[in-house]
Amino acid sequence: MKPVLYSFWRSLAAWRVRIALNIKKIEYDLSVVNLLEGDQFKDSFTSQNPEHSVPVLQFEDESFAQSIAIIEYLDEQYEGKPLLPTDLKQRYLCRRFSLVSAADSHPVIVPRVRRLLAGEYGFNETQVNEFCRYFMKRGCEAMEKLLSHEEYLTYQNLGPYVLGRDISMADLCLIPHIQGARNYGADVSVYKRLISVESALYENEEIERAHPKYHPGFEKPV
């Protein structure tokens, strides 16, 4: 029986997990949770995840949430291409880079935060978008600078990805973050290292196939 991924096309976190499943060659069924229409607050979904967020990955009677935790679980549970390096220092560098987006930038631009800004603090749509763009740009700037640090340059000299020859969880976080920044109007062309890694990543079919444009309900950002 295939696992079921509860996902939404605009979710950067669900995007990370779709890439991970593709790289691990795990076939799955997709269940759309429309975060803009409030599907995440329905009782049927709350029983899966009381945090009211996607992704949720369900294996028969077991449900898994939080994209980074899911990716590490998949890496430990399933064979195939590793998503984290075996070397402990490289694993640290992978996690550090990943969390710039997954822990520091992305959490403050999700629907519940945008809803709070608009409802409780009276932000208009332009102000909400500027708020989100600010934090996504900060994430891009931090990741771009990290890639110029000697400990990351050592691996980039060996290959086109964040940690060199092999795609890792760091790359799974980079791809959605850059597009998320674009969605809020950030000029990401100035982040030369990030764009170089992104371009190399999209040459992989597993990554291309996870793009939101292939997700049910996709709407091209204006």
Image (spheres, rainbow, N blue to C red):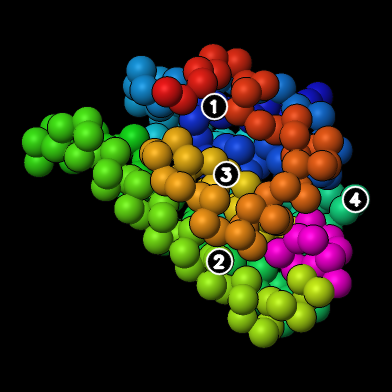
Identify the residue under disc 4.
80
Q: CA distance from mark 1 to mark 3?
A: 11 Å
Q: Is residue 120 visible?
A: no
Q: Secondary structure at mark 2?
A: helix
Q: Quadrant of the C terminus?
A: top left
Q: Label 2 is placed on what type of residue?
A: Glu
Per the rendered image, the range of residues in magenta is: 158-167
User: Which badge, 4 or 1, is on the more N-terminal residue?
Assistant: 1
Rendered image quadrant of residue 204:
top right
Furthest residue toward bottom:
150
Mark 2 or 3, closer to the camera: 2
Work out whether 32 lies above or below 98.
above
Q: Mark 4 vs mark 2: which is more N-terminal?
A: 4
Residue placed most toward the observer, 211 or 53:
211
Residue that carries the numbered disc 2 in the rendered image: 144
Residue most extreme to the front: 190
Circle 1 SS class: loop
Decide if residue 145 is in sight here: yes
Nearest to the eye among marks 4 and 3: give it: 3
Q: In the rendered image, which residue does mark 1 sit on? A: 9
CA–CA distance in space, label 2 to label 1: 26 Å
Task: Give the amino acid type for the residue marked by disc 1 in the picture.
Answer: Trp
189 is higher (above) or lower (below) than 39: below
Residue 154 is situated, as x and y percent measured from the top left of the image, at 76, 81
Question: Is most of the magenta stretch helix, strand or loop?
Answer: loop
